[in-house]
């Protein structure tokens, strides 16, 4: 959605948009001028558009919910891949190097996993982790589920794996910054399927390069817009942090794909349409 195609929304009070590209304020203003009053974004997060600005030009924005299982399953996969050095194993196998040196893994049952953010996705991750027999500790501003809640600093100090599932806002931006990363256990892993800007990428890269952290598995990345979801094979990547991360054998990166399952996509489309219908119903009641 941009000013180029905003006329497609003319005459419609409600539109449904995706999260893959940022919707600029100029586009929001143009949408309001052609009569749009409601935007249903097919995502949990709102980080691709300015909700406050939309409200100021008369547009109400609402997100959707979808099955947390897609992201929860993917999160567990990333944890296991990190612990078993899957990136190195796969790369070696592709060139017929089948040696086992430097790829000895660890087992979840021997580890402590710290879950930051225990909403629907965080809770689903914990449900899956219980089957592995690992120790689970959690941190959330609003504890809502059965868990061993501890202060953030204690979670960082005790956890072998830290997994992020908290919303991104002013309070959580760079939640894992240099200071907090320094407080983490030596050799710990970071897993992020939440939002890229929850992590100070430069601080993370330095901790990985120095050996402070044992590895990272990242489905989201600070500054991913314009890179993820695009074919960049023949174009230079300007993100130095992304290039440095790719060079590390103990870092796995995927392009914000944790949510991307048939079930989750069906949920987002259905719930987005439902949101629009509910908005129209409320408007008619007046």
Image: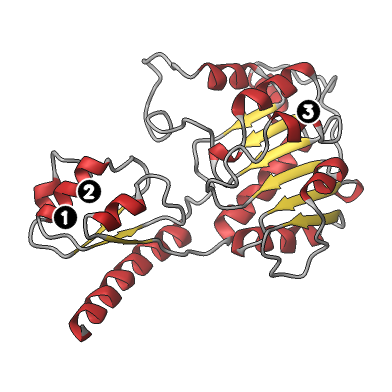
Which residue has dot 1 on it? 32
Which residue has dot 2 on it? 28
Name the foreground residue: 258 vs 60. 60
Which residue is painted at 54% across and 34% down in the image? Answer: 221
Q: Check contact, mark 1 vs mark 2: CB within 8 A.
A: yes
Which residue has dot 3 on it? 213
**Outermost residue, right side:** 110
Which residue is painted at 83% across and 44% down in the image? Answer: 159
Can residue 90 be seen at all in this image of the molecule? no
Residue 115 x %, y % = 73, 52
Which residue is painted at 39% across and 35% down in the image? Answer: 229
* Label 1 Cα neighbours within 10 Å, binned few <14 / some 14-19 / many ≥20: many
Residue 227 x %, y % = 41, 28
| Front disc: 3 or 1 | 1
> Judging from the image, what secondary structure is the residue with disc 2 in?
helix
Give the left or right position of residue 261, taking residue 161 as reference: left
> Judging from the image, what secondary structure is the residue with disc 1 in?
helix
Residue 283 x %, y % = 21, 78
Residue 135 x %, y % = 87, 55
Name the foreground residue: 35 vs 65. 35
**Outermost residue, front side:** 56
Examine the rendered structure and indicate whether residue 286 appears above or below residue 242.
below
Give the left or right position of residue 229, taking residue 163 as reference: left
Real-space CA distance between mark 1 and mark 2, rounded to the nearest whole angstrom = 6 Å
Q: What is the quadrant of residue 103 in the picture? A: top right
Dot 3 or dot 1, earlier in sequence: 1
| Front disc: 2 or 3 | 2
* Label 2 Cα neighbours within 10 Å, binned few <14 / some 14-19 / many ≥20: many
């Amino acid at each position: 959605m941009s000013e180029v195609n905003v006329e497609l929304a003319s005459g419609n009070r409600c539109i449904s948009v995706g999260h893959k590209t940022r919707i600029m304020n100029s586009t929001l203003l143009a949408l309001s001028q052609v009569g749009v009053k409601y935007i249903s974004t097919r995502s949990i997060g709102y980080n691709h558009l300015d909700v406050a600005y939309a409200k100021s030009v008369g547009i109400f924005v609402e997100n959707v919910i979808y099955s947390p299982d897609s992201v929860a399953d993917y999160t567990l996969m990333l944890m296991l891949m990190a612990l078993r050095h899957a990136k190195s194993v796969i790369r070696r196998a592709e060139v017929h190097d089948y040696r086992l040196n430097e790829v000895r893994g660890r087992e979840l049952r021997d580890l402590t996993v710290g879950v930051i953010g225990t909403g629907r996705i965080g809770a689903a991750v914990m449900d899956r982790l219980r089957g592995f027999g690992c120790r689970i500790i959690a941190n959330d501003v609003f504890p809502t589920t059965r868990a061993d809640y501890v202060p953030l600093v204690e979670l960082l100090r005790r956890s072998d794996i830290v997994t992020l599932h908290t919303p991104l806002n002013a309070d959580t931006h760079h939640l894992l910054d240099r200071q907090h990363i320094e407080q983490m256990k030596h050799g710990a892993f970071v897993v992020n399927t939440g939002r890229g800007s929850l992590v100070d990428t430069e601080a993370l890269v330095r901790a990985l390069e120095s050996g402070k952290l044992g590895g990272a598995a990242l489905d989201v990345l600070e500054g991913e817009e314009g890179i993820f979801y695009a074919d960049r094979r023949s174009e230079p990547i300007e993100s130095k942090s992304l290039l440095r991360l790719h060079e590390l054998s103990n870092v796995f990166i995927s392009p914000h794909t944790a949510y991307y399952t048939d079930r989750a996509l069906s949920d987002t489309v259905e719930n987005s349409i439902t949101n629009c219908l509910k908005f129209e119903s409320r408007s008619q009641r007046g």
